[in-house]
Amino acid sequence: MQEQIEQIKDRAVDFFNEDADGRNAGIGQTENMIAFAAAIGCTFMVRQGLQLGWKAALKRDPPKNPTSHEVEWREALLWGAVSGAIVGAARIASRRASSTAYRSMRSVS
């Protein structure tokens, strides 16, 4: 029983360790969490902007459910391609920008 508790403690230390893991070399968990939060906020704002742009350009709401049979294929594919590409690029940009800001703040401290 004591050995199992020690294993759990070791796993917890490894999980919460600030060192980089193999997947995100050079990025600690704190930096990764900040970048994740920035990506969520950026995604929300970009999607709102895309919806407003769609309404302004096409004079109708974007499809809420592109897989619905009531939505035309052309419209579903256009919305999926445009929103997917722009939101994906915004996520990458926000994560990189927040990581850069985090690292510059840490280097000043």
Image (cartoon, rainbow, N blue to C red):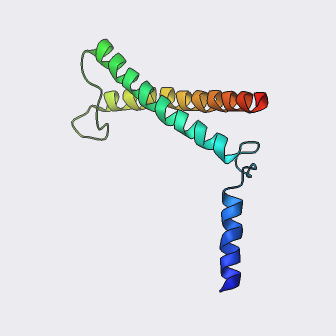
Q: Position of residue 31 (x, y in %)?
A: 66, 40
Left or right: where does residue 88 sit relative to residue 55? right
- Outermost front residue: 109
In this rendering, the answer to whether 34 lies above or below 50 is: below
Closer-to-camera residue (90/73): 90
Closer-to-camera residue (57/70): 57
Left or right: where does residue 30 sit relative to residue 109? left
Q: Residue at x 67, y 33 (%)?
A: 99
Left or right: where does residue 73 sit relative to residue 20? left
Q: Position of residue 6 (x, y in %)?
A: 70, 76
Q: Residue at x 65, y 44 (%)?
A: 30
Q: Position of residue 96 (x, y in %)?
A: 65, 30
| Residue 47 in sight in this render | yes
In this rendering, the answer to whether 38 lies above or below 32 is: above
Q: Residue at x 30, y 13 (%)?
A: 56
Badge count: 0
- Outermost left residue: 70
Closer-to-camera residue (42/50): 42
Quarter that holds the N terminus: bottom right
- Outermost top residue: 57
Quarter that holds the C terminus: top right
Closer-to-camera residue (29/74): 29
| Residue 84 in sight in this render | no
Left or right: where does residue 12 sit relative to residue 50? right
In this rendering, the answer to whether 16 lies above or below 84 is: below
Q: Residue at x 24, y 20 (%)?
A: 60
- Outermost bottom residue: 1
